[in-house]
Image: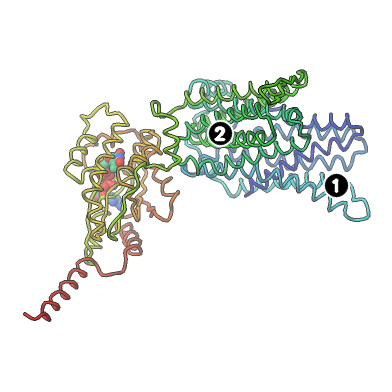
Amino acid sequence: MVTGVASLGDWLGLLATATFASAQVSGSAAKGLAFGSVIAVRLLPALVLGPVAGVMADRFDRRLTMVICDLLRFVLFASIPVVALFSENAGITVGWAAIATFLIETVTLLWIPAKEAAVPNLIPRSRLETANQLTLITTYGITPVFAGLGIAALDRIVRSGNTTPPEWAEASNLALYFNSLSRLAMALVVYFGIKEISGRAHDGKHTGQSMLRQFLEGWQYVGKTPLVRGLVFGILGAFAGGGVVIGTAQFFARSLNAGDAAFYLLFGTLFVGLGVGIGLGPAVVRDLSRRRWFGMSIVLAGGSVLVLAGAIHLTMAVFGALLVGAGAGMAFLSGVTLLGGEVGDEVRGRVFAFVQTAVRVVLMLAIALSSSLVGLGGSRQITIADLGISISSTRLLLLAAGIFGIFTGISAFRQMDDKPGVPVLADLWGSIRGRPLSPGEGLVGRGTFVVFEGGEGAGKSTQVNALAEALRAEGREVVVTREPGATEVGQRIRSLVLGKQQTGLSPRAEALLYAADRADHVATVVRPALSRGAVVISDRYVDSSLAYQGAGRTLPVDEVSWLSTWATGGLKPDLVVLLDVPPDVGLGRAARRGAADRLESESVAFHERVRYAFLDLAAAEPKRYLVLDATRPAEEITAAVVERVGELIPDEPPAHEIAEALNTVAEADLERRPS
Ligand SMILES: Nc1ncnc2c1ncn2[C@@H]1O[C@H](COP(=O)(O)OP(=O)(O)OP(=O)(O)O)[C@@H](O)[C@H]1O
Ligand SMILES: Cc1cn([C@H]2C[C@H](O)[C@@H](COP(=O)(O)O)O2)c(=O)[nH]c1=O
């Protein structure tokens, strides 16, 4: 919420500082120059400061960096109207507005990488996309509109009386005070309310390394990591294309002979498309690999610029603009989510800083170059069949931008593809239809399915047995089972995947073996027992594959999930009890039990990833999970589990009581029948 308010403040501030500067001078040329210089001043510091900002975000405490930056912005924003209040000289007022704007932008450049690098540490991976959706829609969709409306409303209010408002109450001044206070609020919330931003996995690792070394290390990382390279290339390509569309928009509207209204219509449609892409994109593509989605979105945006280039009437242009916006929005969302989720914490600040600097430079150059170029070219009318199509330098530039967009999209796709060999369109179509491709199997009966998950030595077997004992004591039919190894085939798979002699087993083969065990387990043990109405308690299930093969082996989680859904016919547990234990504690317990198996022998980093993947899954669906601290005494854990499972199991009499009751009825019936 505070980010939203602060973002509203920033948009108000940008509009206000620019209008404020132009209001201080007279004559349209001077006004335009003042307005333009403020915007240019606001963009310039990125070039100088971007690299330093990234190093700072990775080197210093991100929370303190954010707080100090916000306090500085609080003072700087307020200083602009205050200086105007006390100065008689318009030159000094405008000069200070420009200096303060430059300083504000400088500070903002330091603040953004610290914030962007900190957010993925605060939000579970599985929710990062939703969080980014909200932030992007708030920052680029809702708040600019509110900022524009807010300034207009303020202006109306202060001018509604008969008397001229005092200088301090001018709409642009009030907006700047609001911006200043929103930054103060942000500083207080971050300092007192979000202390977790300070904690980081690699604290202290960079001490001793020079800032220059760290900066070079960041560049090398961007250049050498295919995923990041593809992402950066794609994002820059998309912004270059976007810059050309913005730079040529006014000329393009004229080429349609549709006047200024068409320009505003196309611009508005572009933003509507952006919102549609960000808001609805994930729901449409569902489980599609985010790496693939990113490349495809850029290709969509590029292809749609081609539609714009060839538009022969306004309706076609509006359709093209909508698709350009939707493609750009989806690329923006997937790109930011991939950067946040897949770039390591220790280098994330530098990568975000690199992207923000490059984006600004590319956008500025694309707008400036394209708007100058279209001014130079003329417009020639050629006739194709009966259609009069105007070929102008605007359309040629759009054509080039579209082709460039498609090229960068394909290139980013190739660099980042995590499913080489899988046909793109079939993959997209399968995702839109919602995998699995075969419908989920229905369930007969009304048993209860409880699963225990957690890392090595968390105490799952101990708790599975304790729960089974408690339920059996109530007379319920309980089936205790586990993965892998509950069936005969499963036993063989278990010895294959856990045997230490099995060296060099590939991650995909491992995932398939666990899925094969699961398919057999569900079909021959779990479903029949649930159909009888039994309580089935399983030691591990689907989440283990998502955590171990997904996060641990770094296979794409959505694909591992799809594989399990297919193997189980979509059968989900009623409750997952997650026993959370730090890997060193759990592995220590397991070691006391005997020699480590193939999975237990993995690194602590592997088991850390597994642990956080389990926690992420639980955070995404809190109603279906019971997360317990597994370092507590075993009896306390059992009590919590029994209580929760008790709320879940239907109150009807247990299965054997029903059977006894049915027998009694049958016997009475027999007695009544004439012999
Ligand atoms: N809450 C607990 N506190 C301390 N020790 C425990 C606790 N729960 C279980 N243990 C002990 O830890 C060891 C591992 O327990 P258990 O076999 O139940 O874990 P597990 O999660 O099934 O392990 P794995 O996944 O490796 O099969 C056992 O020796 C058990 O007695
Ligand atoms: C189901 C499942 C399990 N694993 C791993 C997790 C453990 O290391 C072993 C099972 O051992 P346990 O003593 O029975 O807990 O297998 C996995 O990697 N993926 C899975 O889907």
User: Which of these two is toward me, 118 or 670?
Assistant: 670
Q: Which residue is drawn at 28% across and 57% down?
A: 444
Q: x, y percentage for residue 365? A: 69, 22
Instruction: Decide which of 481, 114 is in the foreground and name it.
Output: 481
Q: In the picture, which quadrant includes the C terminus? A: bottom left
**Residue farthest to the left, as pictured:** 675
Secondary structure under tag 2 reads helix
Callout 1 environment at 10 Å: few (<14), some (14 to 19), or many (20+)?
some
Q: In which quarter of the image is residue 600?
A: top left
Which residue occupies 66% across, 24% down?
398
Tell me: 311 left or right of 175: left
Mark 1 Cβ inside 8 Å of ligand 2: no
- The colour scheme is rainbow
**Residue type for callout 2:** Ala
Q: Where is residue 416 in the image (x, y as percent from the top left)?
A: 47, 26
Q: Where residue 77 appears, x then y in whole percent?
A: 76, 41
Quadrant position of residue 110: top right
Whether residue 95 sits left or right of residue 588 in the image: it is right
Label 1 or label 2, whichever lies nearer to me, is 2
Residue at the spot of label 2: 331
Q: Which residue occupies the extreme front position in the image? A: 386
The residues tagged by marks 1 and 2 sit, at their Cα atoms, a distance apart of 40 Å
* 374 horizontally vs 614: left or right: right
**Looking at the picture, how far across and down is residue 309, in whole percent?**
66, 26
Q: How crowded is mark 2: few (under 14 residues within 10 Å), some or many (20 or more)?
A: many
Asked if the residue at label 2 sits under 8 Å from ligand 2, the reply is: no
Q: Mark 1 points at which residue?
A: 170
Please determine whether, in this image, residue 337 is positioned above or below residue 539.
above
Q: Can I make out residue 588 in this image?
A: no
Residue type highlighted by circle 1: Glu
